[in-house]
Amino acid sequence: MLRLEALRAFVEVADHGNIKDASERLYRTPSALSMTLKQIEDRLGCPLFETDRKSSLTDMGRFLYDQSVVLLRDYDRAMERIEAQSKARSGRLRIASVPSVATLLLPTFLQEFTAVRPDLDMDLVDTDSTDVRLLVETGQVDLGIAGLAGDLPGLASRPIFRDPFKLVCRNDSPLAARGPTLDWGDLEGEALIVNEAARNLPSAEFQRLATDARFSVRNVASLVALVQSGMGVTLLPELATVNLPADLTARSLRDPACMRTVSLYWRAGRVPSPVAQRFLRDFALAAQHLTRTLGLEPIDERTASGG
């Protein structure tokens, strides 16, 4: 079996036409290079060069040269790809995210993240928290960004920020005229449109109102459209209310339980790929700055771990 290092030495000698220049290129002594060439010839049982001056290849030498050039080129390219993957410069990253993060936090971050990784392929799924969990659990995506309740079996997580839920209604709704902060009692008699983001809020008052809700809508665009049409009111996380249509408004709720924690999720027991690990680290840091700019509550690692 001929080693790659030996074939590389042979190609360098053939390219330079002499051992001296090739040895300088390879940072090896001429005697060591001569011994390597002899070992190749002994292994093959035939000479590779017409003369000792190494300036002209034999037919076998030319054949070995052509094969070696292809082999070394493919090997070097493969090693470059392997190194790029290990250094998080390339690969494929599949992410599922709730719409508010996908539209307001990810674009700015991804512009910088992908700019220095031209060989990175990305898939981004924009969906609700329930689907984010399913996609991560089943391995269809590498990472998820969602507001899910508590520790979930089979998933590892890193919290990144918190934001309160707000009541979204039309500007001409009586609720809009009741001031900036509402109580659950203010919603009595209102048609509440339930959505996946708010469905699991722990407030007993909310759950009672949700039980009587006629509509449950998962798509945010459809949800907003129904509120605009006067079909009812809904609850959305504050981040999702940043760019509401002009005819809608958001009101705070006095209940402190109306809060979601948005976290990064990945499958427990599996080591994320290098590029996924880099995304985890960099996005968590970027999200702290972005959410603080929007007036939300970022969570650093010390806060998340109770430190």
Image: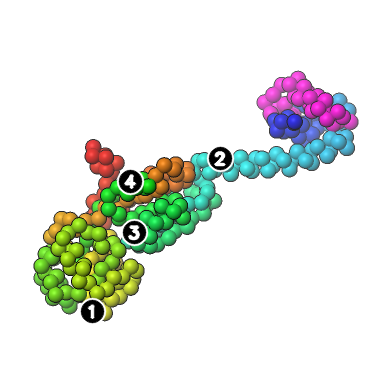
Task: Give residue 264's mark.
Answer: none
From this view, report whether residue 21 is shown above or below residue 233. Answer: above
| Span highlighted in magenta in the image | 21-50
- Mark-to-mark CA distance, 2 and 4: 27 Å
- Mark-to-mark CA distance, 3 and 4: 15 Å
Of 277 and 105, nearer the camera is: 277
**Circle 4 sits on which residue?**
158
User: What amino acid type is highlighted by mark number 2?
Assistant: Glu
> Reading the chain from its start, which is encountered first: label 2 or label 1?
2
| Tag 2 secondary structure | helix
> Reading the chain from its start, which is encountered first: label 3 or label 4?
3
245 relative position to 83: left or right:
left
User: What amino acid type is highlighted by mark number 4?
Assistant: Arg
From this view, report whether residue 44 is shown above or below residue 252. Answer: above
**CA neighbours of label 1 inside 10 A, class few (<14), some (14 to 19), many (20+):** few
**Circle 2 sits on which residue?**
83
- Mark-to-mark CA distance, 3 and 2: 34 Å
At which x and y percent is residue 70? 73, 43
Does the magenta portion include 202?
A: no
**Circle 3 sits on which residue?**
129
